[in-house]
Amino acid sequence: MQTPTYHRRTSSGRTSSNNIRRASAEHHRRSYEHSNPSDSPDELDHTIHTFYRDSWSRSNIRPTASRHATPDAPSEISMLTPVEAPATPESLPAPASPTIIDLPLPGKEARYLPYRQTHLLKGHRLGVSAVRFSPKGDKIASCSADATIRIWSTHNGTHLHTLSGAHLAGISTLAWSPDNATLASGSDDKSIRLWDTITGHPYPLPLLGHHNYIYALAFSPRGNMLVSGSYDEAVYVWDVRTARVMRRLPAHSDPVGGVDFVHDGTLIVSCAGDGLIRVWDTATGQCLRTLVHEDNAPVSSVRFSPNGKFVLAWTLDSCVRLWNYVEGRCVKTYQGHRNVKFSLGGAFGVYGDIERGLGEKKAFAVSGSETGEVLWWDVQSKEVLQRERVHEGCVLGVDTRAEEGLMVTCGIDRTVRIWERNAEVEMRGGGEMVVEGEEVGGEMKVEGMEVVVEQMEGVVDGY
């Protein structure tokens, strides 16, 4: 049967057409655009199919029959802090000032979450496919279809390094090692490279074994293992020290779009265009759980919650779903963005009257959209807390530093944008900064004044 095409972000300036199955056809996809968010499809009387194997290596995951999710999600959803989590791993003009687009979902009153854009980072020649904070939070790495990686300072957006020459095609995915010293990159040239983030040089040995594009990477919490997902439908677990494959998982029947380690490293999650989310035992390679929604929409990205109890999944039916993988049921569905073509990413974060020490700390989920917007949802209530249109075109990558109130986004408009939660931003001139890499000197305009700023690399133009 001929399958429809799915455009992947891998070489996102040139959108590659890959044969990832799209849930048979559009008429099989339920339209939720006009539904009440309190009546999301996963919280009505619909069966959520759950598949599992007969043998189990982890006692805390039991095979269960199909379940119906209830409208009231479990209370632990709001408690997303990790438990003993180890250390983890054509320049376009920006809008004059980001504005809040008050577009609440039906029946819900949107609340303002005070994130605002503070830096606009330019330098990539083609679309930026992924962006990641370093584990220490002092650096940001971005990768692009131009086959380069750029390292930026989180504090002021200064361009620190350009990593290039090791890949022969566009780079789709990045992962930091927990010690902040190594960066892994996956490319359309079928290779994974490890980079020294201090010198900017690649390690001598590439990680070779996949037979097609590399789509997803994640380091284990100890940094000794790396998991990768590829268009060849396989998930590989690598020994970082020897650069050899430890385990090959015949994971899916379509290209693998996302992988992640749980915070203690004992589990791996993967997802693919076959509509399946699979949870694996890291030690044995056994599949402990397979999750699939009844609509069977292709799953393009996946992420464990910080406490390791849930999995957040992005699907090509414009939904982000939160799964309780132990029980095998979807507990929340977040809507309001558009995602039918590209592989998008997102993250978790926290909000509340944190700065003043008042109120309860709550969790949010954030995602990009193919409309150029970034959306924040309250994890528990599914309310849209904030909605910003800042990128020109699809927002492909989002990452957060929850406790510091920082966020970074990237998109096919070739830009990387840094966000801060606080309304009062330290020494930003009351506005946004534009940072262009590999230039020396520049002007910074602050409230009508011009100040010349000399830097090692990077010209800062604030306005």
Image: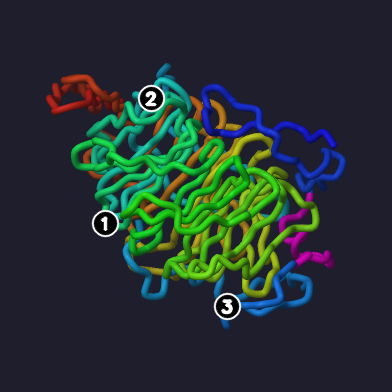
Local secondary structure at mark 3: loop
Specify the segment rendered in magenta. Answer: 35-50
Q: Which mark is residue 245?
A: none
Q: Quarter holding the N terminus?
A: top right
Q: Are marks 3 and 1 in contact (CB under 8 Å)?
A: no
Q: Position of residue 401 (x, y in %)?
A: 37, 54
> What residue is disc 1 on?
179
Q: Position of residue 447 (x, y in %)?
A: 25, 27
Residue type highlighted by circle 2: His
Which colour style is shown? rainbow
Q: Nearer the viewer, residue 463 or 188?
A: 188
Residue 237, compared with residue 458, is above or below; it is below
Q: CA distance from mark 2 to mark 3?
A: 45 Å
Disc number lying in front (2 or 3): 3
> What residue is disc 3 on?
57
Residue type highlighted by circle 1: Asp
Residue at the outermost top position: 90
Q: Is residue 48 magenta?
A: yes
Residue type highlighted by circle 3: Ser
Q: CA distance from mark 2 to mark 1?
A: 26 Å
| Quadrant in the rendering for residue 442 | top left
> What residue is disc 2 on?
124
The residue lying at 80 percent from left, 57 percent from top is 294
Q: Is residue 217 magenta?
A: no
| Quadrant in the rendering for residue 325 | bottom right
Q: Position of residue 405 (x, y in %)?
A: 36, 53
Q: Position of residue 313 (x, y in %)?
A: 61, 54
Q: Earlier in the sequence, mark 3 or mark 1?
A: 3
Q: Nearer the viewer, residue 141 or 73?
A: 141
Local secondary structure at mark 1: loop
Mark 3 crowd level (few <14, some 14–19, many ≥20, 10 Å Cα): some
